[in-house]
Amino acid sequence: MKEINTIFLDVDGTLTDGKVYLDNQKNELKAFDVKDGLIIVAAIELGYEVIIMTGRKSEVVARRAAELGIKEYYQGVRYKKKALEKLMQKKGITYQNLAYLGDDLNDLAVMKKARFAACPANAAQEIRKISDFVSEFKGGAGAIREILTHLLRAKGDYHKVLELFA
């Protein structure tokens, strides 16, 4: 776990409850848990690189990424393994440096190879089966907070999170 310095996040079903609300004016709504956001911001402040890679395209994701200080986010990525490996090569990241948090089949290939793979309680069965850590919380309801707290504790960095807010 010590080598992990990059956290990849899926959005729908991981950072959110997986529901997409569409209205007649072409507006899209998603709900994010502020507790998830707080631990993401703390991880970034501690020097972890946090990157979003999601299958859908949404202005809401760009806005949330900006609010959290996530500088890199990739949307509309159908085949995540290919896109991720291209990005990893560009940035000099290996699977040993990678924590991947996802929930559905399009995350499976990457999660199988990541040093640390984790998911919400309501992730697809195939994802839960290969995950190193399964949150007791559902996506969009504190799962990311629990997962990143677990990861930071395992790495011995969680006390630094507490110091940020002391």
Image: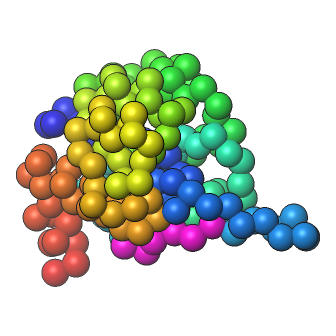
Q: Is residue 34 above or below residue 153?
A: below
Q: Residue at x 57, y 64 (%)?
A: 64
Q: How far across and how far down the image is residue 133, in percent?
A: 23, 45
Residue 31 shown in magenta? yes
Q: Residue furthest front?
A: 125
Q: Quadrant of the N terminus?
A: top left
Residue 143 shown in magenta? no
Q: How many numbered circles does the render carry? A: 0
Location of residue 142 by image quarter: bottom left
Q: Residue furthest bottom?
A: 166
| Horizontal arrangement in the rendering, residue 118 relative to residue 141 (left or right) | left
Q: Quadrant of the C terminus?
A: bottom left
Quick one: 122 or 132, which is closer to the camera? 122
Q: How far across and how far down the image is residue 68, in percent?
A: 48, 64
| Horizontal arrangement in the rendering, residue 92 relative to residue 159 (left or right) | right
Which residues make up the magenta segment? Answer: 30-37
Q: Residue at x 91, y 70 (%)?
A: 25
Q: Is residue 42 above or below residue 117?
A: below
Location of residue 74 by image quarter: top right
Quick one: 61 or 31, which is closer to the camera? 31
Q: How far across and how far down the image is residue 97, in percent?
A: 28, 30
Q: Residue at x 34, y 25 (%)?
A: 112
Q: How is the image coloured?
A: rainbow
Q: Residue at x 19, y 32 (%)?
A: 3
Q: How far across and how far down the image is residue 8, in percent?
A: 42, 41
* Residue 121 seen by the camera: yes
Q: Is residue 125 above or below residue 158?
A: above
| Horizontal arrangement in the rendering, residue 63 relative to residue 128 (left or right) | right
